[in-house]
Amino acid sequence: MRLVIDCFKLVKGQGKSIGIYNLAKNLTRHLAETNRDQEHCEEIVVLGNEYNRKDFEIPGVRFVQIKKNPLSRLTFTLWELFGVKAAAKKEGADRILFPRGYRPLFYRGKDIVIIHDLIPFFYDRYFPGVLNRVENAYIMSRLKASIRRAYRVVTISRYSMKEMEGLCPGCEKRTRVIYNGINPVPTSDRPSALKPDGPYLYAATSMLPHKNAPGILRAYAAYFDAQVREGKDPARLLLIGIDSPDSVPGGDVLSPEAAKYVTCCRYIESGEEMHSLLAGASAFLFLSLVEGFGFPPLEAMQLGVPVICSNRSSLPEVIADAGLLTDPDDVEGTVSCIRRLLEDEALRKELTAKGYENVKRFGWDSRTEQYWEVLTQ
């Protein structure tokens, strides 16, 4: 069997696909390593570009650089619809894996698509107009067609599987749920200017509505006020993903006094700095409205930081009993979780221990075996 992996459209740092990029990179590496020992297939071929060659041209892989510009919208659209089909035929593909989830039109070979989430459908229903309507309609159409017509489908949570079955009844028969694998998170001993003085909550969000930055700010404002009323010193908030509370709708919920306790940073370039700040937090707060999987809470658990997490979409199955789950729309409930966790040292230790155990479920050895089972069917 010759396996072709389509990575042409993957460019690190471009678009919203950093999670997909990392999955494709890690999965390719693990498939190549295990293929050398177990001889699953004759050859692994990666269709890549000049920007990702460094990450995908690895031992056990034959890297084919496509002489086109993956940053051109027209180029990558034509590639996705037609070009990859011709390239797969040229390389003699017996199986072709699409990490981004989009298969070409009229493809009759044995293709496997990875569906990460159905968030475009979530935006179409709950936040119409936030995303470009034409582009989002195209993405929804392509996702739906890929799920319906692919030879095999992989998705990364049971929640996404349920959503797919509702969208394309019967697809469950061709679909395998394979959770994402996680890697060790790098940290650094270098001090960071972003680190607050004293105990702090670390929260992850973005400007996208489903990441729920306003909900985090509402919860912190209510927590701050409750602490002050009782004469207690509030923990500070380090909020990564936005420039300032004023940059998001609803950010004005903070009083001037509470705002002094909040530090925002839209992006931390250094992964070591970001994870070091996370490791120093008293708790991690993640109030997303929808996720296909949810890496950030698992990264916190890897670093021994107890987690307070949204109870929506895939997050309960990823978090299990290793964190406190809360309705992201329930401000009082979220405040209760924050205060309970920060004031109960025994609970923090319990959740830290459970977190370490929980992350063991997502090791790459078992992920790779499951992918080989799908790829060789």
Image (spheres, rainbow, N blue to C red):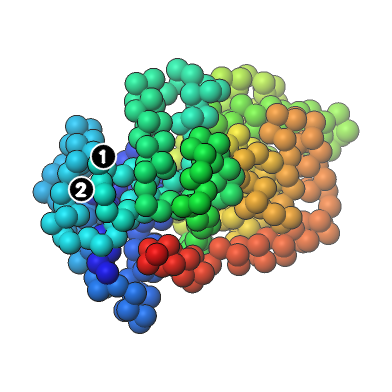
- Looking at the picture, does residue 342 appear above or below residue 181? above
Q: Residue at x 55, y 23 (%)?
A: 126
Q: Would you name the residue on which mark 1 appears? A: 105
Left/right placement of residue 372 relative to residue 315 reads: left
- Tag 2 residue: 85
Which numbered marker is on residue 60?
Answer: none
Foreground residue among 205 and 237: 205
Residue 200 visible somewhere in the drawing: no
**Residue 368: image location, x then y, percent:** 44, 67
Mark closest to the chain's N terminus, 1 or 2 = 2
Quarter occupied by the N terminus: bottom left
Whether label 1 touches label 2, CB < 8 Å: yes
Helix, strand or loop at mark 1:
loop
Task: Residue at 46%, 52% (x, y): give it.
Answer: 174
Residue at the outermost bottom position: 37
Label 2 secondary element: helix
- x and y percentages locating residue 104 in the rendered image: 26, 43
Q: Give the camera-side residue of 157 and 12.
A: 157
Q: How far apart are marks 1 and 2 (CA)?
A: 8 Å
**Residue 143 figure quarter:** top left
**Disc 2 residue type?**
Lys
Front one among 354 and 171: 171
The picture places residue 225, in percent across and down from the top left corner, at 79, 28
Residue 229 visible in the shown view: yes
Residue visible at 84% across and 52% down?
344
Report the side of 169 relative to 252 (left or right): left
- Which amino acid lies under the numbered mark 1 shown in the image of this protein? Leu
User: Residue shown at 46%/31% (left/top)?
Assistant: 120
Please give left or right for residue 318 compared with residue 175 in the image. Answer: right
